Amino acid sequence: MFAEFAQSVLLNPPALPRVLARLVHREQQAIAGKTVVLTGASSGVGKAAAMALGRQGARVVLVARNAEPLAEVRDAVRAEGGDAEMIPCDLADAEQTDTLVKTLLAQFGTVDVLVNNAGRSIRRGAVDATDRFHDYERTMALNYFGATRLTMGLLPSMLDAGTGHVVNVATWGVAAGSMPLFTAYHASKAALGAFGRSLGAETRRHGVHVTTIGYPLVRTEMIAPTGKYADAAALSAEEAADWITTAIRTRPVELYPTYTRVLQALALVSPRAVDTAIWRMGI
């Protein structure tokens, strides 16, 4: 019982800052009636978030590369009484992303919330990838350039409306500062986190908020090929989706698991110790 409680505390964001933030900023954002564009919506966290947003009354616009599983998610949201549309798009393709922006603005007008959830993860040591630079190019193309291109395409309409929210899904490693065996993935998500933090500082005064979510391990199809993760502590896709709905309601600057804050504190004394600890944990 205690072990399960401790695991939950470490995997989820610290409770005290969230409670204090809600006391200071009492007005929470309603999800019902909002137009939410959700990328990476065909499986995993994206699928779970689509279902949760549909249940809470959002108009969900689902985006993913593969049309068939995307249609299944759309139909599942509708089957529960939710409002969902779908637009297939490969966000690693600049032309497709530009077309997506035009389609969104033409069909839905101003988007209330953009959730940049689409992503590609590669677990491979850099020393084993010296002849695989395409791993880095492909990861950046989707995780960073795809997300930022879509964001920048929708940003002018949000600024004109004086309201909007961008939720960027990153990873715990952005806060921890080290993620061995994930150099391509970590670098792309760190870039997205830096982009979002700086963008939010610019646009918050104009009513456009930016949140970075840095998930711990989440039990989805993405981690299935890695056998050592089978018994590792992880969030379910539904628990991870709750972070997204919480972010939309409360608009925090960032949400990271508690253990990353412990690692940040340790890094003040010894960054090398943090690197060693993460390496030994094998996450």
Image (tube, rainbow, N blue to C red):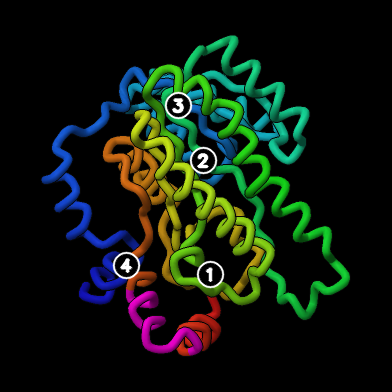
Q: Amino acid at mark 1?
A: Ala
Q: What residue is at 26 percent from the left and 62 percent from the top?
A: 14
Q: Is residue 265 magenta?
A: yes
Q: CA distance from mark 2 to mark 3?
A: 12 Å
The magenta region covers 262-272
* Nearest to N terminus: mark 3 or mark 4: 3
Horizontal and vertical percent for residue 82?
A: 41, 20
Q: Are marks 1 and 3 in contact (CB under 8 Å)?
A: no
Q: What residue is at 60 percent from the left and 64 percent from the top?
A: 186
Foreground tag (1 vs 4)? 4
Picture layout, residue 117 above or below residue 256: above
Q: CA distance from mark 1 to mark 3?
A: 33 Å
Q: Amino acid at mark 4?
A: Thr
Foreground tag (2 vs 3)? 3
Horizontal and vertical percent for residue 65?
A: 70, 34
Tag 1 secondary structure:
loop
